[in-house]
Image: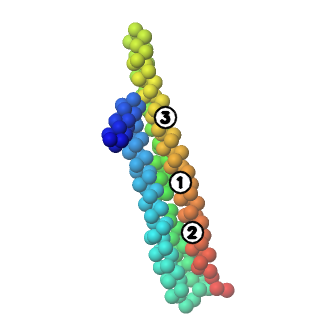
Amino acid sequence: MWEIEAIAAVREFVERGGDVLLVIAFVTAVMWTLMVERFWYFRSGHKREKTRIQQAWDSRVDHSSWNAQQIRRLLISEASAKLHAGLGMINTTVAVCPMLGLLGTVTGMIEVFDVMAGGGGNTRGMAGGVSKATLPTMAGMVAALSGMLFAIQLDRFADDETQRVADQLELEH
């Protein structure tokens, strides 16, 4: 029975907050899907890629010539590109969430102004507009904050791991 109550609570929240909440929920779901994919890559895919890079480097006889340096840079660049793939989109979705919250604020305030323009002091209608103005703002900020914390960690890990790959492919002098 708790599932039905939870669904009813979410439905009521969306009704009070307006359609912008659905857009925020969609963007947040995309953001978290991208983050889970990156975590998955870091935990499994990158280990295989690191092994492949190390084997490619170790298979070379020459590690000190100009050509070897360029191949090393290429291997590091490939690792970095794969580590940073999708991070720009994650950062974009993090930045879009508060903007969508502001869109909800504007649409809610338009509703409040419409009620006020109609006269009659319809406080229930004004309260509904204020709710549609504040709930999307809160939802957008919460989504952005939660995503930002993890996006920073993902960026930091990708940078650190790129440096580890570079350190692993030391040049012989």
Residue sitting at x 44%, y 52%:
32
Q: Which residue is mark 2?
A: 162
Q: Nearer the viewer, mark 2 or mark 1?
A: 1
Q: Secondary structure at mark 3?
A: helix
Q: Which residue is mark 3?
A: 137
- Asked if one can make out residue 70 in the rendered structure from this viewpoint, the answer is no
- Asked if one can make out residue 164 in the rendered structure from this viewpoint, the answer is yes
Task: Please name the amino acid that badge 1 sits on.
Answer: Phe
**Dot label at residue 116:** none
Residue sitting at x 49%, y 34%:
137
Task: Please name the amino acid that badge 2 sits on.
Answer: Thr
Other-residue count near label 3 (Cα within 10 Å), few / some / many at <14 / 14–19 / ≥20? many
Q: Secondary structure at mark 1?
A: helix
Q: Residue furthest front?
A: 1
Q: Is residue 59 left or right of residue 1?
A: right
- What percent of the width, then of the height, locates residue 116? 43, 14
Q: Relative to 161, is 7 above or below?
A: above
Q: Which residue is mark 1?
A: 150
Q: Secondary structure at mark 2?
A: helix
Which badge, 2 or 3, comes first in the chain's sequence?
3
- What percent of the width, then of the height, locates residue 169? 59, 79
- What percent of the width, then of the height, locates residue 106? 45, 28
User: What separation in Å lies between label 2 and label 1 (alpha carbons)?
Assistant: 18 Å
Q: Is residue 122 left or right of residue 47?
A: left
Q: Is residue 81 left or right of residue 159?
A: left
Which badge, 2 or 1, comes first in the chain's sequence?
1
- What percent of the width, then of the height, locates residue 143? 48, 44
